[in-house]
Image (tube, rainbow, N blue to C red):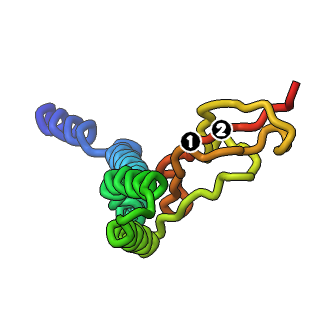
């Protein structure tokens, strides 16, 4: 009988109680809760990363469109800057040419000059009107100052080289002489 009782005792002792049965379930529930929180955090992190990447993509698109528009508007700037000295030389030739026997040459130079200006105008290149205008350092480059009573102080008296704008952007400032008060 002793053996039987001892066997029964050991079985009763080894039998799971209600408390010990709920401990693994509680551990499993806590583990599942932790996993859920970890997945929720991962989902928030992924959403945050997605939103940031989306914003980066939108900023990239805007920048590319802006650069494309600028290239279309100002891409021919270097070509125009190369043509401007040719126009300057044609204008100088016209100023210094005499009318004696060179009428056809002068007329040809005038026509070429007019054609070049018309071509530049097609690409929105305009001359800066400087003579008689108030001096503006954003559009004029002062080469000399002349004391005079004929013009108000800080007024452009003479233009050495014309300035040009490409749309709203300065291509080249006008080189000018500026009036100062006579002494």
Image position of 183 with respect to 78: above or below: above
**Residue that label 1 marks:** 175
Residue 145 x, y percent position in the rendering: 70, 30
Residue 119 x, y percent position in the rendering: 38, 72
Query: Element under label 2?
Result: strand
Identify which residue, 156 or 48, lies in the foreground: 156
Label for residue 167?
A: none
Identity of the residue furthest to the front in this view: 100
Callout 1 environment at 10 Å: few (<14), some (14 to 19), or many (20+)? many
Placement of the N terminus among the 4 image quadrants: top left
Query: Element under label 1?
Result: strand
* Res 104 → quadrant: bottom left
Identify which residue, 170 or 31, lies in the foreground: 170
Report whether residue 47 is seen.
no
Identify which residue, 76 or 56, lies in the foreground: 76
Q: Residue at x 66, y 40 (%)?
A: 137
Cα–Cα gap, marks 2 and 1: 7 Å
Identity of the residue furthest to the left in this view: 3
């Amino acid at each position: 009988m002793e053996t039987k009782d001892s066997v029964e005792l050991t079985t009763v002792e080894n039998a799971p109680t209600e408390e010990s049965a709920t401990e693994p379930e509680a551990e499993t529930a806590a583990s599942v809760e932790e996993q859920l929180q970890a997945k929720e955090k991962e989902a928030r992190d992924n959403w945050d990363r997605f939103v940031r990447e989306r914003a980066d993509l939108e900023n990239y698109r805007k920048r590319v469109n802006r650069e494309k528009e600028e290239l279309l508007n100002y891409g021919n700037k270097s070509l125009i800057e190369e043509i401007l000295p040719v126009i300057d030389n044609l204008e100088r030739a016209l100023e210094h040419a005499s009318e004696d026997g060179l009428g056809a040459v002068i007329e040809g130079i005038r026509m070429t000059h007019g054609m070049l200006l018309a071509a530049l105008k097609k690409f929105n290149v305009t001359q800066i009107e400087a003579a008689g205008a108030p001096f503006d350092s954003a559009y004029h480059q002062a080469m000399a100052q002349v004391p005079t009573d004929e013009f108000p102080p800080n007024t452009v008296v003479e233009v050495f080289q014309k300035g040009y704008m490409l749309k709203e952007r300065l291509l080249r400032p006008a080189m000018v002489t500026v009036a100062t008060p006579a002494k």
